[in-house]
Image (cartoon, rainbow, N blue to C red):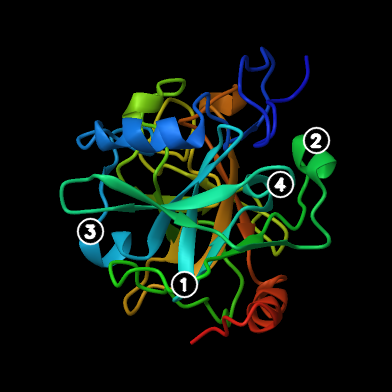
């Protein structure tokens, strides 16, 4: 069976063998999706009953929708710049940033430039190996003040097993049910396996991936992963994929993260080239 289809295609089926799922797929055109999200104010996001993100955290996060039916999450890193996963910004589609007002009514903000890391390889990602899954979306005008840029982490030490990280995304709360997306939620997860500079795997400490727990899901691709230690939040990685419990297909098991340590210099340089230097 083929792996889950990438962000630029609509998801019609999932593989029946245990494979990590690329998370960006959705069945709705982006304008329709934005309208549907206006009706789902109370919906969950991030599977496993995650709590709504605190306003101080949610202000850093943006919902991204694409003209080919994709839905992803991104993190605002400058007044007119959003960092997301490269598989959320593939060629051949238009992308919009969704702004919600206090009543959760959406407004679509234009994206004028899309820049994908030159070393990103979709085939590598679909074969479940590490690649440069990072991209930048620039808006032609500054984003509203409701969005607040988050700093990129300057890591002094690598992520270790047991380290706690905070994932924040707009994804669905029930796999396959788009109406359970559209609210920004957060999950406090822990690093497991052998975290490194190419890939980090996170798990719900309450379930350890053996049964369904908190994890990223469809629509959480590109979601920021924050250091959750004391002090200001800083972005250490971007969500790329998930699995179900015990490495089955789906969500609720592992959350796969592309760490930014290898790509931070590219992000900073690319932001300057786009005319959106980081604070």
Q: Residue 127 carries which label?
A: 2
Near mark 4 (Cα within 10 A), the count class, few <14, some 14-19 or many ≥20, is some
- Measure how far apart labels 3 and 2 are at the Cα level: 35 Å
Disc 4, SS: loop
* Of residues 202 and 107, the one drawn nearer to the viewer in this rendering: 107
Percent x, y of residue 278: 54, 83
Q: In this view, does 139 lie above or below 15?
A: below
Query: Which secondary structure lies at badge 3?
Result: loop
- Mark 3 Cα-neighbour bin, 10 Å: few <14, some 14–19, many ≥20: few
- N-terminal of the pair, mark 4 or mark 3, is 3
| Residue ID at (72%, 75%) | 266
Residue 52 rendering spot, x and y as whole percentages:
24, 47
Q: In this view, does 252 lie to the left or right of 269?
A: left
Q: Which mark is residue 141?
A: 1
What is the x, y in percent for residue 235? 49, 69
Q: Give the Cα distance between marks 4 and 1.
A: 22 Å
Of discs 4 and 2, which sits in the foreground?
4
> Is residue 269 depicted above or below 233 in this figure?
below
């Amino acid at each position: 069976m083929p792996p889950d289809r990438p962000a630029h295609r609509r998801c019609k089926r999932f593989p029946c063998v245990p494979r990590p799922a690329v998370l960006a797929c959705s069945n709705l055109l982006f304008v329709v999706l934005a309208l549907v999200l206006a009706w789902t104010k109370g919906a969950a996001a991030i599977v496993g009953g995650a709590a709504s993100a605190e306003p101080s955290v949610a202000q850093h996060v943006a919902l991204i929708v694409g003209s080919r039916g994709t839905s992803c999450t991104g993190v605002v890193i400058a007044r007119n710049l959003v960092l997301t996963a490269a598989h959320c910004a593939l060629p051949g589609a238009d992308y919009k940033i969704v702004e919600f007002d206090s009543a959760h009514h959406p407004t679509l903000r234009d994206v004028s430039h899309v820049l994908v890391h030159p070393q990103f390889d979709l085939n590598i990602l679909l074969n479940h190996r590490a690649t440069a899954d990072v991209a930048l979306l620039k808006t032609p005008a500054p984003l509203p003040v409701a969005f607040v840029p988050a700093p990129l982490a300057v890591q002094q030490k690598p992520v270790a097993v047991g380290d706690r990280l905070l994932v924040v995304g707009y994804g669905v709360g029930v796999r396959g049910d788009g109406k359970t997306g559209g609210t920004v939620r957060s999950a406090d997860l822990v690093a497991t396996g052998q975290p490194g500079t190419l890939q980090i795997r996170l798990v719900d400490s309450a379930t350890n991936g053996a049964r369904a727990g908190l994890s990223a899901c469809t629509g959480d691709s590109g979601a920021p992963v924050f250091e959750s230690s004391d002090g200001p939040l800083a972005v250490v990685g971007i969500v790329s994929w998930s699995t179900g419990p015990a490495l089955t297909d789906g969500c609720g098991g592992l959350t796969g993260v592309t760490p930014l340590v290898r790509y931070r210099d590219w992000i900073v340089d690319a932001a300057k080239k786009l005319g959106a230097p980081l604070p």
